[in-house]
Amino acid sequence: MSTSEGGAGLKRTALYVVLVGMAGFYLLPILTGLFTSITSPASYTGQAPFLPPLSPLLPETGSFSLQSWGNAFDGLARGLANSFILVIPATILSGLFGSMAAYGLTNVDWRGQVGIYALFVAGIFIPYQAVLVPLTQFWYNVVPLQSLFAPFAALPLVQEYHWKLVALIVTHTAYGIPICTLLFRAHYKKLSTEMIEAARLDGASVSTIYRRIVLPLSVPMFAVVFIYQFTQIWNDLLFALTIVQFGDASVVTQELVGIGVSQSGTNFPLRMAAALLAALPTLVVYVLFGDKFAEGVTT
Amino acid sequence: MAELTLDSVTKVFNEGGSDEIVAVDDVTMGIEDGEFLVLVGPSGCGKSTTLRMIAGLETVTDGEIRLGGRAINDTAPADRDIAMVFQSYALYPHMTVRENMSFGLEESTEMPDDEIRSTVEDAASMMGIEELLDRKPSELSGGQQQRVALGRAIVRDPAAFLMDEPLSNLDAKLRATMRTELQRIQDDLGVTTVYVTHDQTEAMTMGDRIAVLDDGVLQQVGTPLECYHTPNNRFVAGFIGEPSMNFFPTTREGDALENERFTYPLPDDVRETLGDATNVTLGVRPEDVAFAAESEASAEHDFECVVDVVEPVGESNNVYLRFADAPDGETFIATISGMRTVSSGDRVVATIPPDAIHLFDDRTGEALKNRSLDDVDGVDPT
């Protein structure tokens, strides 16, 4: 008895050591960033980065200051606004289209639908890097989006440079549809066929069945798709750099590239504060919809 | 309210392919206006496929389906003026009971909202679910969900009801209650109903007529008692009746039928019905096997047996009998009064009266002779 108890105690200790070690490993960079961001830039020494700024108690750590957060917000304000303008429509549209596509490919019977679905799945694996140059060509030389969009600039709150964000929204929607279709299809496969047949017998058309029955039942999956797409599109730098390029329409990921870096050196507290600020929206989204995410992914 | 006709209806899946399946093979039958017809058969016999073809959820490979004289093969399911009740109820989980029942009226009619509301409330009171109208299906018990599914069908006021094993998901007691209630409702509404089940008890108790299917082929259409007393073939004889008919494979030897365990002499008139058949199956229903008073076999249709197992049902006992020289497990059933006590291991004399036997041709399965009903009072299968 005692040996197994002792053995169990040893196992438990080892388990906790591993868990604490892993937690520490993952949290340390964020903690370092947090502590750096609340250090005043003037007193920042770059030493003992994982200790909070407690000078004069710990002389190497620098003094506390929230100045960097304020500066970060000023610097990123436009990028944050542009990111929101990008992410909200792109997430909603890719989710909606993915849901419609999945419905048509799963709950409606027609010839050749498996082949079409295979094409959608193949679309998930397109490497973004491979399509960068064609995309630039497309948006700058082939489609006259800039001139098409110009009349909209007369509307309040709309700027001329927003056409680049429209291009980015369309791109992200298009490239997001395959994964959204995949996620919704998994969910729609589980819908009762008899229920859909009952709706057919009740006189509902294909689109009515989608609107009144399938769509309301997809809410848990929409939460999953929303979180996933929001995070993917918010964090994307590649398409943003290529299509929007630096300028008025830059999104927050682009703004992060250059903030706090100048000829006089690197302002680490500012860069850390900016990075954490840019990550905040995705964190909030996860907090709000996180349990729906866990529910939707496991069912 | 209309008559439903199936005319040589056939359904083939994967036609022409290597895995071609003939699910329904040339089924022809007529269902009269207001009739309750039960489609019964073992799993995979094609009864659900037939029902789905009537509903329009499956296409018809060959043949014609007519409702009220009009061919509906190519009509969309929603336009066929039929309502269906599914085995799993198929309720819309995100809608309340009221919304579930209104959905069909909203989508396929031009009824104004207040009329829909009153129609739904009428149907709900007929089903006894008025207090449940604002609940969601997940808040209801199985029996209540079933009533909602029925109510949803009733509200449509269709020309025909189609029911696909609606009682299978209910517990035994609830099933018995719903059986009677379904019959009462169908009687009140007078709507032509096609009811699919694999349970022969439901078929016998509910149907005006029953249609027995096996492997896609229609075996017999008739009233429950017709199918019970005068089955067309061995399949119907064995399927209808619980516990099922006893079958003994025999060969004809002169005046009698020879079996490994016994010899059964045939009366002259019965012998004539055999024609030139040599391999014949002798069938006798458990309730027709009687116990003789003597302890030894004296008459020519008495056989000495040993009791193997006794199943008390309450009002009767199902006694599993074994011929003296038969191995364990080779038994036939006799149903006797519940008041008689018999125990396992008892030696008894079983009588198989010749006017109660059924004879089936082994080659075709066809019934050569069914039991005579002359001496039975008040049994009129038609």
Image (cartoon, rainbow, N blue to C red):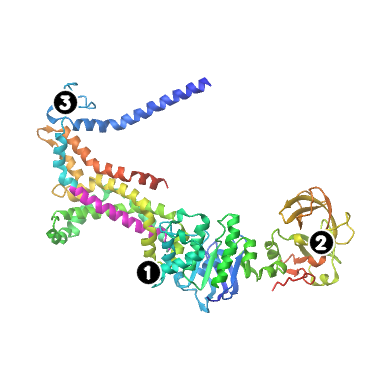
Of the residues under marks 2 and 1, which one precedes in the sequence?
1
Q: Are the residues tagged 2 and 1 within 8 Å (C-beta)?
A: no
Q: Residue A57: which disc?
A: none
Tell me if residue B362 comes above or below residue A1 in the rendering.
Answer: below
**Residue toward you, A18 or B275:** A18
Is residue B372 at all visible to an observer of this figure? yes
State the image quarter where residue B116 is shown: bottom left
C-alpha distance separating marks 2 and 3: 107 Å
Q: Position of residue A14 (x, y in %)?
A: 41, 25
Q: Amino acid at mark 3?
A: Gly
Mark 2 Cα shell of 10 Å, populated few (<14), some (14-19), many (≥20): many
- What label does residue B352 carry, if any? 2
Whole-angstrom CA distance, mark 2 to mark 1, is 66 Å
Quarter of the picture containing the C terminus of chain B is bottom right
Q: Are marks 2 and 3 on the same chain?
A: no
**Which amino acid does the dot numbered 2 rest on?**
Ile
User: What is the secondary structure assignment of the residue under circle 3?
Assistant: loop
Q: Could you tell me residue B374's position as x and y percent? A: 79, 72
Chain identity of mark 1: B
Q: Which SS type dominates the magenta stretch?
A: helix
The residues bearing labels 1 and 3 have C-alpha atoms spaced at a distance of 72 Å
Secondary structure under the numbered disc 1 in the rendered image = helix
A61 on left or right of B264? left
* Chain at numbered mark 3: A
**Vertical side of B80 occupied by A89: above or below:** above
Counting from the top left corner in percent of width and height, residue B77 is at 46, 69
Residue pointed to by mark 1: B113
Residue B58 visible at all: no
Query: According to the image, label 3 marks what residue?
Result: A62
Q: Which residues are magenta?
A: A81-109
Residue at the location (22% across, 32% down)? A34
